[in-house]
Image (spheres, rainbow, N blue to C red):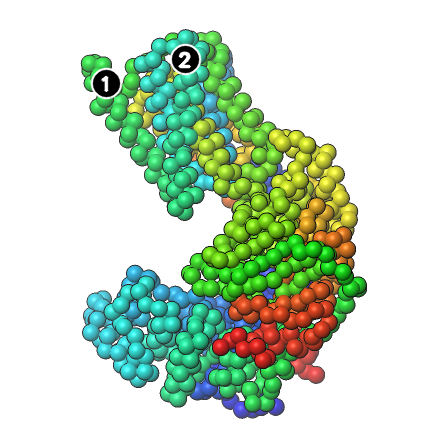
């Protein structure tokens, strides 16, 4: 044990909960001065919460922060900044219409007589920082005019200007090109040499091995490992991040796939900022099979699914064929009418209406795709008949069809949504994380139902963050990493370690470059 | 994460945080609160609260004329309230009912005076035209919302000013000079007899507009309760993403909300002219449009409750005038109490209760975690 040894930064026994969710469960993080400490874990593992506590945005429910032997109580983020904590957020916090230098000094301007901005002094200090740390940025350009990689440097200069000693970089490479990443790493190395301490949040293994001095791994709000990169292999690290005990095994028979129902060719999707999130993806789904796509959250699966279901637009040259018909850039309504069902990951915002009743939630989509006898009035006989079928076949525990959805437990809401989509006469189901946050019993139930659906000759595209789920259910497996789809073999062809490595950008497939 | 420890919430024996009892208690205590405050307020002005209350009731329901007047003032509340309910139930913030009303009234007054049509038909044309002018006024914010993503909060509100000023301008600078008359009020001449709504109770100012208002409330109720369109409207309002994913044509649905709400707003103005003032008078509404938004909030967006609240609102208005005649009190006292009632009813008691409940639960949860992890560390 190295308990006696004093570290530069120590966060001890941090606990933070949001309602029923425990985001940080007794986390202890120790960082040496002038090192790069990588904080890694899947999305939702608790990294961002922990760093928000360090930078004074959240207050911990329990635990203490010690910097250089002194106990800290940050009242707010200004207070943390004053004490040398600087955070560079994943989403840049810059004013588009101001110049670079105005953004850097914002809220921390040097003043004359306590009220006038001393532009000269500001500029001198910013220029000094740029010289010291070899940043070459056009100070008088407007933020909206300079490229993303420079914006990141602006953010770093901004925290240095505020006097940061510990700099937190939240997934800094997610917006950068490979060249940009190299530039960033150079800057990081230089900062270290000058005595600054860096905490790097990421889930890309290659980056960790390239730059980190020490690694702390989080999973489900707890620390699962604290290692040095030289002491560990990619495989072992991947295991710490995503590996879970296999609690469940699905009872899956080999299937004889039928004809192609969904064909995706050269699908490319950009987000609102114009960053490519899905790159040239090709795959198909046959009748009667489950095609699984595994991947760390934020790898582009969300954009892929949204483009397939008509929720966001695909780029030119992309083609999505459903039963041979081109449905590229259709609407969700079109998709429903053609027989595509969709179970979204976000069951309370997209999958259901918490304020609505059970029946209101049960008939959504069905009333579009199948419809009722009366096109004008709600036929409660038909509605109740259909809703009862969903409730009964999917074992939804409810006090009645007029109960509000929000009073149901997560597992029951999920069963209702899965039931609604699978009882309809859909030919293809697009499913995201069907078992997220529900108990083991409910998971088993949902899995069984999904396998039963394929036996009826329907096709399923399963997108999940749970690797085990994809491996247990899928006839063919793909991995999505950085928007690129990688083949990962058929059912039980590759091991969990092999696929896990692909998910984190490791292995021989060098998509990272 | 929450996996693995999912529990079904145990029903508490006395669940004060939800259900009908909260609502009943809310209105009961708000009413008591207003009575107490009102008594205090009246007493402070040197009058007898009981006498004032008697005068209000007598003024509102004491005789045929009083009841008629109460219905007359309930009428605009019914229509503007219905317009607000349609909008808010479906997640559209129509703050422009006032403007839609003005435009509707103006159009109805113009058609009612300048065009000669058969009696009855004339009235219907006036009302429909008033409704559609409200629709046109609402289409502009709708287009800005759907295609340029400009929040209708701002646009509908701004359109109010444009509408009132536009109508006044037209009346003062175009209509009055064209008639060659001199007048001290900025108003159009009275509309023709054939364009007027028939009287509901003889010798009072209550018109068939009251029935039209109730009909609109019932229509809104049926729309949301019994039709597929209403189901979609409700889902779009409560959770847009859910409706979109479910295959609802969200744009079309959204637009129809704007259209319906605007129509009811315009109709409210049309009824004021054809069944109330018989002409467009500058500043006729005071704040009728805004009152609609307020009472929609009081009745928790329930169109049937709206009918009762509107009648009470109308009764208070006529009763207050009677009180003013019989005592030294100003009728603004009653207005003041109405506003206090709105505030009391709008307090989110559930939210406050939940806030403290959550804090207590969180403390317990935290103690548990610390005890558990403490035990682990000891090992």
Q: Is residue B366 visible?
A: no
Q: Residue at x 70, y 76 (%)?
A: A495
Residue B142 appears left or right of A353:
left
- Measured from the top left, where is residue A121 in percent x and y? 22, 75
Q: Is residue B175 above or below residue B3?
A: above
Q: Is residue B158 above or below residue A446?
A: above
Q: Is residue A131 visible?
A: yes
Q: Is residue B37 above or below residue A436?
A: above
What secondary structure is marked by label 1?
helix
Q: Which mark is residue B122?
A: 2
Q: Chain of mark 1?
A: B
Residue A472 appears left or right of B225:
right
Q: Quadrant of the C terminus of chain B?
A: bottom right
Q: CA distance from mark 2 to mark 1?
A: 22 Å
Q: Residue at x 36, y 15 (%)?
A: B112
Q: Nearer the viewer, residue B156 or A376?
A: A376
**What is the quadrant of residue A154 in the picture?**
bottom left
How many numbered marks have been drawn onto this rendered protein structure? Answer: 2
Q: What is the crowding at mark 2: few (fewer than 14 residues within 10 Å), some, or many (at least 20)?
A: many
- Measured from the top left, where is residue A505 in percent x and y? 56, 75
Q: Residue at x 53, y 80 (%)?
A: A206
Q: What is the crowding at mark 1: few (fewer than 14 residues within 10 Å), some, or many (at least 20)?
A: some
Q: Residue at x 23, y 78 (%)?
A: A124
Q: Nearer the viewer, residue A442 or A295?
A: A295
- Measured from the top left, where is residue A313 in percent x and y? 49, 54
**What is the quadrant of residue B175 in the picture?**
top left
Q: Chain of mark 2?
A: B
Residue A168 appears left or right of B158:
right
What secondary structure is marked by label 2?
helix
Q: Which mark is residue B176?
A: 1
């Amino acid at each position: 044990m190295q308990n006696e040894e004093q570290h530069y930064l120590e966060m001890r026994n941090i606990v933070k909960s949001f309602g029923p969710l425990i985001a940080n469960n007794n986390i202890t993080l120790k960082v040496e001065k002038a090192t790069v400490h990588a904080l890694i874990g899947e999305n939702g593992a608790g990294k961002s919460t922990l760093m928000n506590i360090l930078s004074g945005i959240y207050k911990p429910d329990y635990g203490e922060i010690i910097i250089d032997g002194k106990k800290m109580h940050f009242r707010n983020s200004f207070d943390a900044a004053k004490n040398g904590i600087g955070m560079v957020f994943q989403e840049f916090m810059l004013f588009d219409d101001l110049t670079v230098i105005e953004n850097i000094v914002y809220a921390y301007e040097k003043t004359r007589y306590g009220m006038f901005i001393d532009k000269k002094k500001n500029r001198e200090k910013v220029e000094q920082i740029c010289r010291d740390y070899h940043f070459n940025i056009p100070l008088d350009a407007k933020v909206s005019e300079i490229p993303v990689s420079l914006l990141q440097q602006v953010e770093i200069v901004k925290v240095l200007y505020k006097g940061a000693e510990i700099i937190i970089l939240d997934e800094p490479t997610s917006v950068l090109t490979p060249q940009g990443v190299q530039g960033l790493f150079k800057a990081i190395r230089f900062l270290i040499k000058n005595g600054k301490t860096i905490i790097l949040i990421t889930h890309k293994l290659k980056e960790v091995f390239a730059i980190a001095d020490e690694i702390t791994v989080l999973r489900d709000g707890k620390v699962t490992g604290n290692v040095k990169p030289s002491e560990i292999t990619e495989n072992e690290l991947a295991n710490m991040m995503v590996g879970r005990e296999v609690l469940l095994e699905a009872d899956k028979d080999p299937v004889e796939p039928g004809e192609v129902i969904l064909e995706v060719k050269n699908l490319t999707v950009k987000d609102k900022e114009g960053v490519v999130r899905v790159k040239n993806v090709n795959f198909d789904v046959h009748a009667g099979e489950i095609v699984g796509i595994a991947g760390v959250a934020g790898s582009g699966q969300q954009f892929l699914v949204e483009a397939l279901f008509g929720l966001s637009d695909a780029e030119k040259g992309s083609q999505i064929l459903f039963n041979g018909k081109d449905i590229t850039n259709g609407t969700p309504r079109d998709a429903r009418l053609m027989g595509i069902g969709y179970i979204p990951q976000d069951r309370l915002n997209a999958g259901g209406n918490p304020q609505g009743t059970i029946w209101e939630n049960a008939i959504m989509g069905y009333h579009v795709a199948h419809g009722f006898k009366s096109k004008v009035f709600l036929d409660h006989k038909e509605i109740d008949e259909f809703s009862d079928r969903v409730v009964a076949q999917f074992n939804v525990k409810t006090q009645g069809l007029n109960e509000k959805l929000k009073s149901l437990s997560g597992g029951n809401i999920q069963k209702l949504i899965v039931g609604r989509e699978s009882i309809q006469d859909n030919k293809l189901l697009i499913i995201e994380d069907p078992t997220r946050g529900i108990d083991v019993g409910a998971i088993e139930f949902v899995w069984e139902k999904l396998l039963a659906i394929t036996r009826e000759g329907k096709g399923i595209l399963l997108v999940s963050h749970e690797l085990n789920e994809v491996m247990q259910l899928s006839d063919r497996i793909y991995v999505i990493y950085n928007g690129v789809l990688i083949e990962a073999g058929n059912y039980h062809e590759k091991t969990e370690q092999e696929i896990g490595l692909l998910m984190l950008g490791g292995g021989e497939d060098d998509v990272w470059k | 994460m929450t996996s693995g420890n999912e529990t079904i919430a145990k029903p508490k024996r006395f669940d004060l945080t939800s259900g009908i009892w909260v609502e009943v208690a809310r209105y009961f205590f708000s009413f008591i609160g207003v009575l107490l405050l009102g008594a205090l307020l009246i007493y402070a002005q040197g009058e007898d609260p009981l006498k004032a209350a008697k005068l209000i009731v007598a003024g509102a329901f004491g005789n045929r004329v009083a009841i008629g007047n109460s219905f007359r003032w309930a009428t605009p509340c019914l229509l503007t309230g219905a317009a607000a309910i349609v909008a808010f139930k479906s997640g559209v913030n129509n703050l422009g009912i006032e403007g839609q009303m003005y435009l509707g009234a103006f159009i109805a007054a113009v058609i009612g005076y300048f065009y000669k049509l058969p009696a009855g038909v004339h009235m219907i044309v006036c009302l429909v035209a008033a409704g559609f002018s409200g629709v046109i006024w609402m289409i502009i914010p709708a287009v800005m919302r759907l295609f340029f993503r400009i929040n209708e909060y701002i646009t509908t509100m701004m359109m109010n000013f444009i509408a009132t000023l536009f109508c006044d301008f037209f009346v003062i600078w175009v209509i009055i000079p064209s008639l060659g008359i001199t007048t001290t009020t900025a108003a159009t001449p009275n509309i023709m007899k054939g364009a007027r709504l028939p009287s509901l109770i003889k010798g009072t100012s209550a018109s068939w507009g009251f029935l039209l208002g109730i009909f609109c409330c019932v229509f809104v109720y049926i729309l949301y309760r019994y039709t597929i369109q209403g189901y979609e409207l409700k889902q779009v309002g409560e959770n847009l993403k859910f409706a979109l994913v479910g295959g609802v044509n969200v744009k079309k649905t959204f637009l129809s909300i704007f259209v319906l709400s605007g129509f009811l707003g315009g109709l409210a103005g049309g009824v004021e002219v054809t069944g109330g003032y018989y002409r467009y008078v500058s500043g006729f509404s005071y704040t009728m449009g805004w009152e609609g938004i307020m009472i929609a909030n009081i009745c928790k967006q329930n169109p049937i409750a709206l009918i009762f609240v509107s009648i009470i609102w109308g009764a208070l208005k006529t009763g207050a005038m009677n009180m003013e005649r019989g005592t030294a009190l100003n009728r603004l006292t009653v207005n003041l109490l109405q506003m206090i009632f709105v505030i009391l009813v709008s307090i989110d008691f559930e939210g406050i209760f939940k806030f403290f409940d959550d804090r207590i639960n969180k403390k317990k949860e935290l103690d548990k975690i610390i005890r558990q992890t403490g035990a682990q560390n000891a090992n």
